[in-house]
Amino acid sequence: MDSYEKLKTARKNGRPTGLAYVNEIFDKQIELHGDRRFSDDQAIVGGVAYIDKRPVTYLAMEKGVDLQTRMLHNFGCPKPEGYRKALRLMQQAEKFHRPVICFVDTLGAYPGADAEERGQGQAIAESIMEMMGLRTPVVSVVIGEGGSGGALALASANRVFILENAVYSVISPEGCASILWKEASPENVARAADCLHITADDMKEFGVAEAIIPEDFDRFPKMCKNMRNLLVAAIDELSALSPDEIVAQRYDRFRKFGIFEENAKKHHKK
């Protein structure tokens, strides 16, 4: 399956969204609302729950499953208050020494005028900056689309996992095609998707993701059980580190991307 086909699969209707994973993987969820500044953005849903009898903070980007819920969740495109809510919950998790688990699935941050007026860029930047220094384990899973900085705001983690047909990109292929070739035709979008190296295999090869999670939506509970085991193992490993070591490990992980970038350039020239 080529990059463009993977992109279409990641966007396919009926694919499980963030809340489906939250409800299947966690026990005793308590959803928390609001950024304490403006309002509650339902594009990011978060709260406190248990995984394997361990308290954690969960954050999930939610696209919705039908027209009504998609409008409620703004099609999974967060506004500044969504990122500020996520940051508030991450800081709360740090205070109470809870690991943070994030599910990423977004075309990107909402680009509307109202979001820009309320500081969209600053909200994303603050989320990334604070997340990088968070003194508690952070694990993120890309379950559909990981679009640009809107996704990175919940993926500046110690461990990143990605589903086998999910995609992760610095810009949407449509946006890339519009910039480079002035037209987002299907041919140009497919060309851009290939150039951007957006697939799970690419992410694993370049070190952006630690592991690829197989998809089996026909047996979704079993798939989530396997994902839960992977998340628990990652949390156990990271929880053995001191807070300073957790931050240092996350910092070192992202510092390595300069090396992977050079490898990607060599790969592209081939």
Image: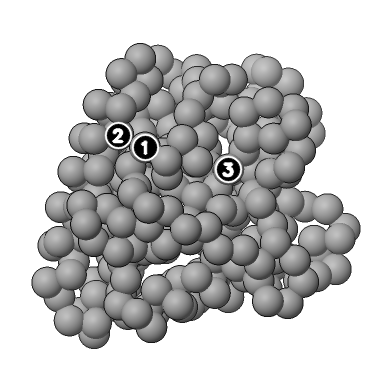
Residue 20, position in %: x, y?
A: 46, 35
Identify residue type, mark 2.
Cys
Pointer 2 residue: 224
Quadrant in the picture for the C terminus: top left
Pointer 3 residue: 62
Q: Tell me the element at label 2.
A: helix
Q: Residue at x 34, y 47 (%)?
A: 26
Q: How many marks?
A: 3
Residue 225 appears anywhere in the view: yes
Mark 2 and mark 3 lie on one chain; the one further toward the N terminus is: 3
Disc 3 or disc 1, which is closer to the eye? 1
Quadrant in the picture for the N terminus: top left
Q: Residue at x 55, y 48 (%)?
A: 61
Residue 55, position in %: x, y?
A: 30, 64
* Residue closer to the observer: 119 or 136: 136
Q: Tell me the element at label 3.
A: loop
Estimate how packed mark 2 is, as few (under 14), some (14 to 19) or many (20 or more) residues with alpha carbons within 10 Å.
many
Task: Please give left or right for residue 229 compared with residue 163 in the image.
Answer: left
Residue 33, position in %: x, y?
A: 62, 63
Pointer 1 residue: 24
Gap between marks 3 and 1 measured at Cα: 15 Å
Q: Residue at x 42, y 44 (%)?
A: 22
Identify residue type, mark 1.
Glu
